[in-house]
Amino acid sequence: MNLNATLIGELIAFVVFVWFCMKFVWPPLNGAIEARQKKIEDGLAASDKAEKDLELAREKAAEELKEAKTQASEIIEQAKKRATLIVDEETTRGQQEREKIIAQGHSEIESERNRVKEELRQQVATLAVVGAEKILEREIDQAAHSDIVEKLVAEL
Amino acid sequence: MAAEEVTLSSHIQHHLTNAKMCSTDAGLAFNKACADSGFWTWHIDTLAWSIGLGLIFLWIFRSAAKKSTTGVPGKFQCFIEMIVELVGDNVRDTYHGNSKLIAPLALTIFVWVFLMNLMDLVPVDFLPAFAGFVGEQAFGMDPHDVYMKIVPTTDVNMTAALALGVFILMIGYSIRIKGLGGFIGELTLHPFSSKNKLVMAILIPCNLLLETIALVAKPFSLALRLFGNLYAGEMIFILIGAIGLMQLPLHFVWAVFHIMVIVLQAFVFMMLTIVYLSMASTKSH
């Protein structure tokens, strides 16, 4: 139990062990722990940031979707309006066309009727002249009485 | 010699005696031949076990350090890093200076002292009996003349060496941080001080006496606390080991209790080392 040279031996051993620990054991272990802590910290920060970004992106997407919907409904509205407009225009145009066609038809009919009337008048005149010729036989000088016949024809 | 009766007290005495080595005029001598060799006696069992355990500590931690990565650590690495973090946290909490030495010092003390204390849990008769057997068979010695104390911390030389190392560091840190004048001032100008120069001259010796005692008491308490706890624990193991078959339950109970003691004493030694060095490196006054 007495103090003796063992003390010196143990002191030397102690110094050597502490020195070795200080040089070759503590720095790498502590360094690894600290580096890992840093890594985990960075990782957590990155995941936080990613989460925030995701949230932001989601919000943005929702906003854009909303905008797109409004735009779509606007477009549909416009299209409807335009469709009504086109239908109205076409209807008006159709009616006009119809009226025009009808008017044309009327005028065609009118001119046809006039032509037929003229033709008829000619034929009646001819017929009247032929009839008068037959009635009066040769007595009637065709040249002398043609003005009477003309008058007759004009009266028809 | 072999027929010499083994009494309880001689059995205990045998267990509590270190294997000694010393050099005499006739060359190296061992054990009883070293009875009066004075200071230059070496406790070869203490030296061998403590240095062996210290090397085991360094080997384990060095192999963890070599494999250390910043990636996912393995279980072994986690375990080692847990110890490193325990020590590192305590050092950071207690020691506020900037020193590259304190943390590895604390780690060495904690693990080394723990491993040495751990030897206390090896049943007391195993290794001494084995050593006696080897001594008898291989060297033709009387087994009663073969001594083997396997718990280095039950040797006051071991604990005193640790405490002395810490004490030297305490003084070194004091002088390095406060300067030689600051260190001497701390020893002489407190706790009593006076503005009157004559009164101060009387107070200085009182202060020196008090502060020196306070300073020297630190390594003493460090060394003797660890030694006393482990020596007493070992003693009780030996006593329990001497009472025959009934020792088994008793031994179990005491060993379980001792698990706490060995960790606690290693931790206390480490903490006090940090605290003392922290005190030495802060200008308290």
Image (tube, coloured by chain):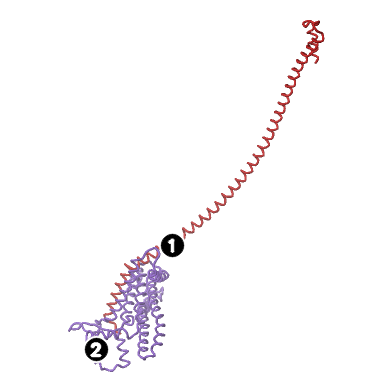
Chain colours: A red, B purple
The answer to whether residue B83 is left or right of residue A96 is left
Corner quadrant of residue A21: bottom left
Q: How many marks?
A: 2
Give me the C-alpha separation between circle 2 and circle 1.
62 Å
Q: Mark number for residue B109?
A: none
Judge left or right: residue B180 versus residue A119. left
Instruction: State the residue in front, B273 or A83.
Output: A83
Quadrant of res A93: top right
Neighbour tally class for label 1: few under 14, some 14-19, many 20 plus, Cα within 10 Å: some
Q: Position of residue B105 (x, y in %)?
A: 35, 71
Query: Is residue B206 at least partly visible in the picture?
Result: no
Estimate the x, y position of residue A60 in percent, counting from the top left.
Answer: 55, 51
Whether A104 is drawn above or below B102: the answer is above
Give coordinates of residue B159: x percent, y percent. 33, 79
Along the horizontal axis of the image, is A153 left or right of A7?
right
Determine the secondary structure under disc 1. Answer: helix
- Amino acid at circle 2: Asp
- Of A91 and B276, which appears nearest the observer? A91
Name the residue at 53% across, 55% down: A55
**Residue B194's spot in the image, x, y percent?**
41, 74
The residue under the point 62% across, 46% down is: A73
Q: In the rendered image, which residue does mark 1 sit on?
A: A40
Question: Furthest-left residue in view?
Answer: B26
Q: Quadrant of the C terminus of chain B?
A: bottom left
B283 or B140, which lies in front? B140
